[in-house]
């Protein structure tokens, strides 16, 4: 795996004169696609693709906005930012799915400690709320959407705080580092302990999984090879997402509509 902290210019498209890989795949490390491990390291190398993963979403978004990667695996909400600006440099190739249902639709659960008296989002005003990052389609945008429907702003209603992803969100609630979080149902269900230590007081059912994008004009054979590999891959059960399906705009249309309704800057 390449250095995720290298400057974007150090990962510019092109393999140079050494005959190295000429295509760049950039991924959000939190999404769980193990590009530095087999079978992916071999698949990508054979196709002339080098990969980089990072948890620095600001940097990753800048790379994609500057059209540096040939291929990117990013949250659906980040793709929406491009789409909403009219940027059509990338198109969806594949979309992740729920490992429980096999469908590209995800449910986010609003959870608090089991002994917390709260019964809904309305009871959490002014409290600490754990989320992964401001690109997260399961922890950041769901409460923003739910509160916007009530004419409220996320940053005004909750004291939002970034925390470790997935099970780390639940652990932050149990340890009282935060009072609440919204976490993927699939993550919450993976550990039976979560049902003993937390309770569900709300939900958002319109979330969408991350998307593999390819740049416009990318060689058709490369796209076919990559799509076939994504569809054939069976991720480990302890991962966050299930396998991939081919991407269709219909998969994300409703979620993009919800995001369009949010105030600028969210």
Image (spheres, rainbow, N blue to C red):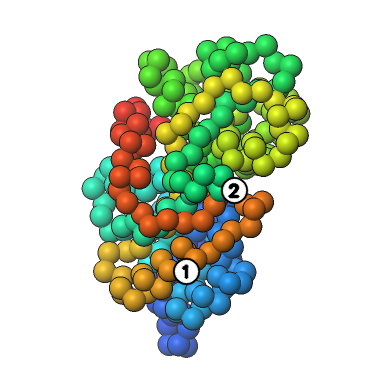
> Residue at (54%, 22%) from the top-left corner?
202
Residue shown at 39% from the left, 21% from the top: 148
Above or below 241: residue 6: below
Q: Quadrant of the N terminus?
A: bottom right
For the point 75% across and 34% down, which residue is it? 193
Asked whether disc 2 touches disc 1, contact meaning CB atoms under 8 Å apart, the reply is no
Which residue sits furthest left? 86
**Which one is nearer the viewer's eye here, 200 or 71?**
200
Q: Quadrant of residue 123?
A: top right
Q: Position of residue 72 (x, y in %)?
A: 43, 60
Q: Residue 145 lies in what quarter of the image? A: top left
Q: Which mark is residue 27?
A: none
Q: Provide the secondary structure element on which disc 1 rests.
A: helix
Task: Check the image and report above or below for 202 versus 104.
Answer: above
Visible residue check, residue 115: yes
Query: Which element carries disc 2, helix, strand or loop?
Result: loop
Dot 2: within a 10 Å radius of its alpha carbon, few (fewer than 14), some, or many (20 or more) residues? Answer: many
**Whole-Å distance between the Cαs marked 2 and 1?**
19 Å
Q: For residue 126, what is the image quadrant?
A: top right
Q: Residue at x 51, y 75 (%)?
A: 43
Disc on the earlier residue, 2 or 1 = 1
Figure quadrant of the C terminus: top left
Where is residue 172 drawn, in percent x and y? Answer: 70, 32
| Residue 229: numbered disc | 1
**Residue identified by numbered label 2:** 240
């Amino acid at each position: 795996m390449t250095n995720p902290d290298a400057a974007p210019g150090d990962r510019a498209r092109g393999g140079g004169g050494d005959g190295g890989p000429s295509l760049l795949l950039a991924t959000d490390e939190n999404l769980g696609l193990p590009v530095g491990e087999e079978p992916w390291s071999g698949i990508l190398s054979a196709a002339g693709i080098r990969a980089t993963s990072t948890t620095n979403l600001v940097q990753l978004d800048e790379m994609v906005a500057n059209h540096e990667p040939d291929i990117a695996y990013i949250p659906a909400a980040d793709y929406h930012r491009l789409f909403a600006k009219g940027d059509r440099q990338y198109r969806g190739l594949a979309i992740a799915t729920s490992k429980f249902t096999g469908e590209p639709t995800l449910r986010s659960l609003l959870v608090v400690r089991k002994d917390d008296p709260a019964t809904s989002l309305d009871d959490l005003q002014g409290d600490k709320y754990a989320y992964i990052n401001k690109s997260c389609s399961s922890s950041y945008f769901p409460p923003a959407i739910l509160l916007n429907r009530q004419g409220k702003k996320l940053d005004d209603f909750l004291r939002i705080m970034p925390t470790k992803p997935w099970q780390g969100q639940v652990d932050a609630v149990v340890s009282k580092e935060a009072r609440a979080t919204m976490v993927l149902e699939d993550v919450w269900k993976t550990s039976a302990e979560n049902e003993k230590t937390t309770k569900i007081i709300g939900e958002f059912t319109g979330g969408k999984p991350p998307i593999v994008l390819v740049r416009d004009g990318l060689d058709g054979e490369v796209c076919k090879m990559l799509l076939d590999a994504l569809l054939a891959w069976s991720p480990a059960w302890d991962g966050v997402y299930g396998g991939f399906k081919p991407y269709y705009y219909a998969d994300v249309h409703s979620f993009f509509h919800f995001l369009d309704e949010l105030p600028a800057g969210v």
